[in-house]
Amino acid sequence: MPPLEQYSPEYLNAAEWAFVMAATARIIPSDGDGPGAIETRVPVFIDLQLAGDFGNAADLYMEGPFRPDAPDTLGPQSPLTPAEIYRGAIEAIDTACTDEYGSVFADLDPTQQDEVLSALEESPSTSGSTQDMAEDSGGGAMNTGGSTAFGLAPELKEFFALLVQNTKEGYFADPMYGGNAGMAAWSYIGFPGARGSYAEWVGREEDYPLGPVSISGERA
Amino acid sequence: MARTDTKRDVVIVGLGWTGAIAGIELAKEGLNILALERGPDRSTVPDFKYPEVIDELRFGIRYGYMQRPKQSTLTIRRSLDEEALPYRRLGSFLPGDGVGGAGIHWNGQTWRPQAQEYRLRSYVEESFGADVIPENMTIQDWGITAEELEPYYDRFEYMAGISGQAGVVNGETLEGGNPFESSRSRGYPLPPLAQQPDGLHFAEVARQMGYHPFPRPAANASAPHVNEYGMQLGPCNYCGFCARYGCLNYSKSSPQTCILDALKRYENFNYRVNSEVLRVTLAEDGQTATGVTYWDAEAEEEVTQPADIVILAAYSIHNVHLMLLSGIGEPYDPRSGTGTTGKNYSYQMNGGTTMFFEDRQFNPFVAAGSSGMSINDFGMEQIDYAAEGFIGGSYMTCGHSNGQPIRGIAVPEGTPSWGADWKQAVGTHYGHSTSLGSHGSNMSYRDCYLDLDPTYTDPHGRPLLRLTFDWKDNDIRMTQFMRQRIEEIVEAMEPDSWQSSYKEDGAIYDVRPYQTTHNVGGAIMGENPQTSSINRFQQAWGQHNVFVLGASAFPQNIQYNPTGAVGALAYWTTDAIINDYLPNPRPLV
């Protein structure tokens, strides 16, 4: 596996790659316990996802008319594919960063980057996460935030939710998708990956002794 | 291009649980049967084999076994005044796709509704008076009783190899089961699943509080089982990949593990995949169906398939869509309240409280889909609707069905959704939380229904189905009642901290977060053709050779997961077709 700096993106251009590298490094930072997005190669995962069926909206209903400014609770209504949303949003955010701070997102210091990400999260046009954190518990919480310079156009409003979701996907998905390098994120939380057989462990309240395996048979 | 194929005795639309049950039962009678499945073929090997199937991203997150909205979706609005918009990406519910249907990717929670649920309006009126029913609530009786259906539940549970502890057998209450259940003729075919420490802790506390905990009935085999078709289940290995996945271990009951290989041995049964039925064709007088028209994706042509009997066995909302597109029954009009096709769509009212236990290790990845301990002490039949001010009820379960990390690691309220604190929290709390959830009824209402969308179309140029649905005060009061009961139990379980998530006053239906794939109603069964689409034998009132199977028949949603009732009704209907309809085809009511 080449170092991350030598990776040639399939979909993202240089400016977009720099943004994704910088943003995922703040969404799952490297300091503290557990690996960060960079060591686990989350940006590679995101690039490959955007280059494939996910990025191209291969499974989604993409027929018009589109109502991108519809209430978030009616689900995504943008005419753009996820890959196009990344492209449009990164350009808009970098433009806003240049206006506000004098340089693009990737060149800001971490504190400024966190400010920008918080502003995106709190923007009234930001859609809530499409993945549910508590499946059995029903409804999702809504974002209610104030206005900011980083409010995106309605057709791009899902960007921040997608970015956070995709970052977590890359962190925890099987390594064959390009992220979770070395299964480090699985080791961190104690998830054994693709072992798939625990009959002897039912009812035992002890730490599971074996490290993770991947679908291709790697062991951590 | 178009072609007309040779006439069959029976054409079945959809090859999931109900299509497979009808297929094998009618195949045994020697009928010439064709099942049409719009999705691909799927078998345990190669489709569900280890390790490829336990790929969370592909199947748990990107929905590899689900309907692709690009191919088939619907539009959704929350009121008659809102513009319905397409369900462009799956979220709130996940219809299945391909052979096996949603029977591939369920968790396997298998219940029998309470006797009162089949005659809900009568029960409410007799017990509490008609005044307790809100004006816009359109609940109805099913036209069938628990006693009549009991043998068919028994049949389904033994065919599917359900693991559980019976509570009431032939009127006698048994220790450790659900003492409130309708009496059954014998126990479950398999003993209950082994339980995890979180469910066991709940059960102990619940018992001390005077409640009646029991293991949740499971279509995850606790031991080897051979069913009436000679199909074999192996014991579940608690792999933790159940809902959204095919079973790698031949342990989860599904059309694949319980029926299909036996069914495929009948030479008089055939099935075609990638064959989406476009409409049911009716005779000129409209009194019978002549067959179906479907799109053969391989041949790229429309096919006219004549048949003597048409069985709609698609997912609930697709049954309704086909009926609306085919002119089966009069479309329901919420303003006048007339018509029946599309009437009484309802959903499921669930809530839950998450508990954090720093010093306990729950190993969430060690799980079967139906792991967990339940109580039925707040079921529909236990509640005084007049005193509480709502109609409905819930069962409650503590346990976990998977430990897959992308699908969500519970973190304490106030934890940011990203950044250093989020990373720290997932590391700290993974494996140390559990939930106690309520799974509850949802009533039917005059303005919650299905019809055809005026704007959006599918790849065949047909109007999409349009769903109009929102949460109502009655059901919000129900879930808030459950919240109070659950929080009392949670306090007694003594977690380090806990947090609740229940619908509150003013809740709006949000199509994004997954809630449940228990979409019911729209082609409801009942006692007369003015108020229902199908009779008690799931036979269309207007076309006696059309039968409609599945949860589209529920006049309002039960408090339980629907598959048990869907399976029992499929056996009930095929029994009526074989013993009553075939000798003398006619309206059975």
Image: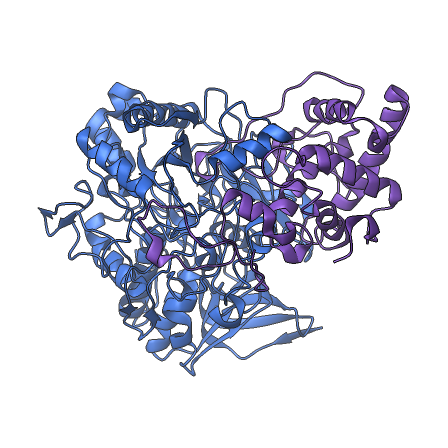
Chain colours: A purple, B blue
Q: Nearer the viewer, residue A88 or B339?
A: A88
Instruction: Give residue A76's position: percent from left, percent from top.
Output: 67, 37
The quadrant in which the C terminus of chain A is found is: bottom right
Number of marks drawn: 0
The answer to whether residue B273 is above or below residue A214 is: below
- Residue placed furthest toward the top: A146
Q: Hey, which quadrant is residue A71 in on the image?
A: top right
Residue B40 appears left or right of B174 = right
At horizontal 67% and vertical 18% (from top left) the residue drawn is: A145
Residue B401 appears left or right of B218 = right
Task: Judge whether residue B297 can be spotted in this image.
Answer: yes
At horizontal 68% and vertical 58% (from top left) the residue drawn is: B460
Q: Nearer the viewer, residue A167 or A90?
A: A167
Q: Nearer the viewer, residue B363 or A137?
A: B363
Q: Nearer the viewer, residue A112 or B70?
A: A112
Task: Judge whether residue B375 can be spotted in this image.
Answer: no
The quadrant in which the N terminus of chain A is found is: bottom right
The answer to whether residue B581 is above or below residue B513 is: below
